[in-house]
Image: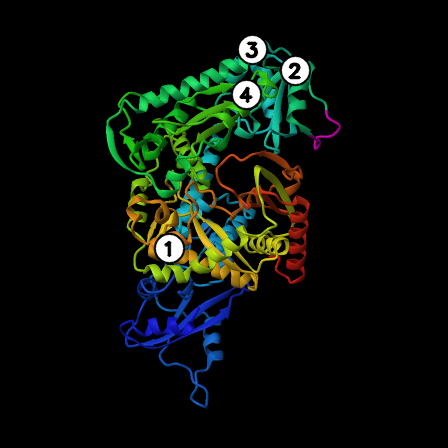
Amino acid sequence: MSQGEIEAQLLKIKDIQAAVVIVREAGNGQKQLGAYFRASQRLTTDEIKNTLSAKLPNYMIPSFFMQLEQMPLTRNGKLDRKILLSFEDNGHTVAAAYVSPESGLEARLMEIWQDVLGIQQFSVVDSFFDLGGHSIHALTLMSRMEVAGYHTTLTDIYHYKTIRALAAYLQSAQDSERALKQQGTIETKQELISWLHQETDGVYELVKYQVRDFLHEVRDTRVLYFNSVDDVNPVMRIMNGKVAKELQPHYIVPLHQKVKMDNQYQVIDEEEFVQRLGLKTMDTDQAARLREQLEDDYLKRDQWVKTGQVAQEYPLSGIQQMQISFHTPPSIGLFRLDEYVNYDFLNQAYAQFVQSQGLLRSIPVQRDEWTYWREYVLPDADLPTLTILDVTDCNPYGPFMEMINDYMTNTRYTGERTLFQMFVLKRNLREHVVITLYHHAICDRVTSEVAERQVLASYRNLLQNHSLPTDKVKPYMDYVEQIQSGPSGITEQALISDFHLEAFQQSKQDLLQTPKLRTSTEAYLFSVSIPAENPSLEFALSVFTRGLQIYLGMDQLPLLFLYDGRRYDEATYYNTVGEFIDFVPMLMDMKQNPDEMLLSVRSRLDLLKRHTINFMNLLTGPAYKNRWERARTLVQFGKQYEQLDVFMFNYLANSAKEGLKCSQFYDDTVIKQPNPLPIYSLFNCIASSYTDGLIFSMRCSYEIGVEEVRAAFYQAASIASQKGEVQ
């Protein structure tokens, strides 16, 4: 990065007469760029940033700008940089359209954003991206806001972008929760027991337990014990609308079946808990009938969608074309509703979601060498209601759990059919798990967050008799058209040079010819757990690359970095269902320190956004068959993608946000299974962060020593700790 290059671009702006760019350290220790300039008239930050963004990548645009009457000089006539830094410390900034935070939520969010971004003066309507925000900042913001009591996802930060918009979204969610609580007039356990006794003349007891569920999460579970339980429905009816949400019982069972614990804080596994409540296990035939219900539900919805008129047809994106050729298990999205649910409103929210997302109303149609989406208009007839699997009266483990796991694992969406299914698992009176199975061609990690946010927002608005959300959803077709328009503003040779593609290919070929490496007919699945107080992308990438360097003895790694692909130029797609990821070739230089390595990654990701570069589209799209041939050759993944992910790295951070620990999920078992794909992965890695460390989940299609790999990663983490690289 050249400060001189930034200064040169500043001097090209009309009215700017002198400019200097300085690297300074923010209060949080992060390095940031500051621009100081003299101009013939008053300029605003927005004006300068808009001009620079057309010439420079985001990471080269200064975080703040300061307009001066004169540049400060030393006695020798040289620029006095110390005085410039003191100006910033005193808070002098460029005049700009500034909107101050309102007291309360906006002010609290402003404090968090100022600390994380290292900027003290900005507006609540300034975009996260315009403030220099990137994925590392977003992950940190997400964690910091979670600690402060504001539940957000990466998608929320990217989608709402500004403090004002994010605060409005969070306030709406808080209002919904508050409204639900206020619906009930009975707010204490004592009031509930006394009131129930008066209404029914029965004897009641409400007990709260700590139960570890099927997702390994420990949750509060309330049981209402009653001395005469022939039918829970009368009790449910009289409680409806009168009892605060947090008091509503998950189970109502006879008093003589009370589960006794040594102390109220003891955690009990759910399977044992429901057995002690007296719930009987579902038999195999019952489970089989529920599976048939799910299968019939999918076929009915698929046929219903295709009764609508065809709205449009357009080609699949490059990543979708690859995914559609694989017959892999579906991607699973789920979220909870821990409350008594209004099913009519939930079905309306589901219909609104399908209406807003074109890919949920589309089927893939094969044409010659490529596949196209055929998108339908939602039919006039009512959308079939969501299937609800009600196992309230049963033990949800045993044959039922086996059936659900098998259905989610072995369902395949093939042919000219819709590629998803949503249904509801009612596990007890309160707990509802909304499960969605997606073909990978229409789902990435963000898709599940989009589904949860949009369905819940519509459902909450219906409950409160508010109008449905009106967030505009960018059609997936717009994304396909945008990436097909690129690469733009960059030559093939510049792309090859900027991404070091020649060295990338050579490093990949050298690696594949290493005598130590032999392909295997089986895939090794294993994990490595690395303790860390504050796990971060920087630390995860450092451990991964250094661990492989130790194991393989290489100084350069031809790594494929997963880019979420939802932002190109000024367009963002963070509220759209679909598969957007791109595999970006990154030659990682092991001589770089973690800061340099991360900056190198960020600078190349920024090139993707500026020049609309999508490697999967470039390598597979028919329109590029006779274009960009040199670049296509250097990044070639193989005819059947067999050399796609020799090294692949994907970082997930949500587990840290949710307060989960490595110990809850780490398993040192090594699994061998037939290769699920034609791809020969050397180290396909998903790094997940938790509150106490990282878990690297690996898939490998080569003969390797698993314990040697683990030892290399432990050594890499130790080196990182000794060098103070743990953030």
Q: Nearer the viewer, mark 3 or mark 1?
A: 1
User: Magenta stretch: dominant SS?
Assistant: loop
Q: Nearer the viewer, residue 257 or 437?
A: 437
Secondary element under disc 2, as helix, strand or loop, is loop
Give residue 231's mark: 3
Using the numbered discs, state the Cα–Cα distance from disc 3 to disc 4 in whole angstroms. Answer: 28 Å
Q: Residues within 10 Å of mark 4 (few under 14, many from 20)?
A: some
Nearer the camera: disc 3 or disc 4: 4
Query: Label 2: which residue?
Result: 278
What is the basis of the colouring in this image?
A: rainbow
Q: Position of residue 148 (x, y in %)?
A: 54, 48
Query: Which is more N-terminal, label 2 or label 3?
Result: 3
Q: Please, what secondary structure does the residue beneath circle 4 have?
A: helix
Q: Nearer the viewer, mark 4 or mark 1?
A: 1
Tag shown at residue 631: 1
Q: Is the residue marked by circle 2 packed among few (<14), some (14-19), or many (20+) residues within 10 Å? A: some
Q: Is residue 474 visible?
A: yes
Identify the residue position indicated by label 4 in the image.
Answer: 403
- Disc 3 and disc 2: Cα gap in Å? 15 Å
Point out the frontmost of discs 3 and 2.
Answer: 2
User: What numbered label is drawn on residue 144?
Assistant: none
Q: Where, quadrant-wise, is the N terminus in this rendering?
A: bottom left
- Amino acid type, callout 2: Gly
Q: Callout 3, which amino acid?
A: Asp
Is the residue marked by circle 3 packed among few (<14), some (14-19), or many (20+) residues within 10 Å? Answer: few
* Residue depth check, mark 2 versus mark 1: number of the one nearer the observer: 1
- Disc 1 packing (10 Å; few <14; some 14–19; many ≥20): some
Quote the CA–CA distance across marks 3 and 1.
Answer: 70 Å
Label 3 close to label 4 by CB (< 8 Å): no
Q: Who comes first in sequence, dot 4 or dot 1?
A: 4
